[in-house]
Amino acid sequence: MRDSGVFRLSVLVALFCLTFGAVPTPGWPASSEVRLSKGQTVYVPVYSNVFSGPRSRPFHLATTLSIRSTDLSASFRVTSIDYYDTNGKLVRRYLEKPIVLGPLASSYIHIEEKDVSGGFGANFIVKWEADRVINAPIIECVMIGATGGQGISFVSPGQEIKE
């Protein structure tokens, strides 16, 4: 006989993978489409926990915000990375001054599993700019957690909210 809690979590993970992994996410360009821009403000959903089981127990997750240059020849500046909680309240500013990412370079911000200050509806607002039109970077969060032999991981794509 199956443990119903483990079975439910497995179903939840499978549904999450189908929703966020195997099916194209609305608003994302097709892989053959190149997105060009001189700058954007990007909203990135963060799930510091997801709920499981009949009592909706939180399953805490570590989060890594990933910013990846997709341009082969141009640099760009990340001008701000701000972290907001479920209620839209600013929790933390991550940059004191802009950082420059060169061609194909990457940067990240890591939030530990035990940091639940953002809550379930947390998000990053990332602003970047370039001196000329370039391939827009990929900005996304990777969430991962493991407890009691169970693990979960998924990616949350950023969504441009302002050009």
Image: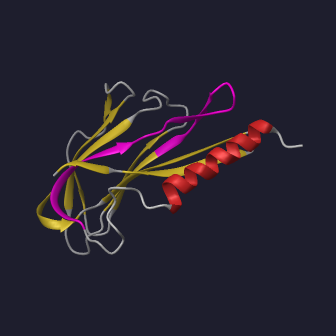
Looking at the picture, how far across and down is residue 66, in whole percent? Answer: 39, 53
Q: In the rendered image of this protein, does residue 90 appear above or below residue 31?
A: above
In magenta segment, residue 94: no
Front residue of 88 and 110: 88
Q: Position of residue 143 (x, y in %)?
A: 51, 46
Magenta region, residue range:
35-63
Q: Tell me how the rendering is colored.
A: secondary structure
Residue 74 percent location from the top left of the image: 19, 69
Q: Position of residue 158 (x, y in %)?
A: 34, 50
Along the line of sight, the residue nearer the viewer: 24 or 81: 24
* Above/below status of 107 relative to 116: below
Q: Residue furthest left?
A: 131
- Residue drawn at (19%, 52%), measured in percent from left and top? 40
Q: Residue at x 26, y 75 (%)?
A: 72
Residue 49 is left or right of residue 67, and the answer is right
The secondary structure making up most of the magenta span is: strand
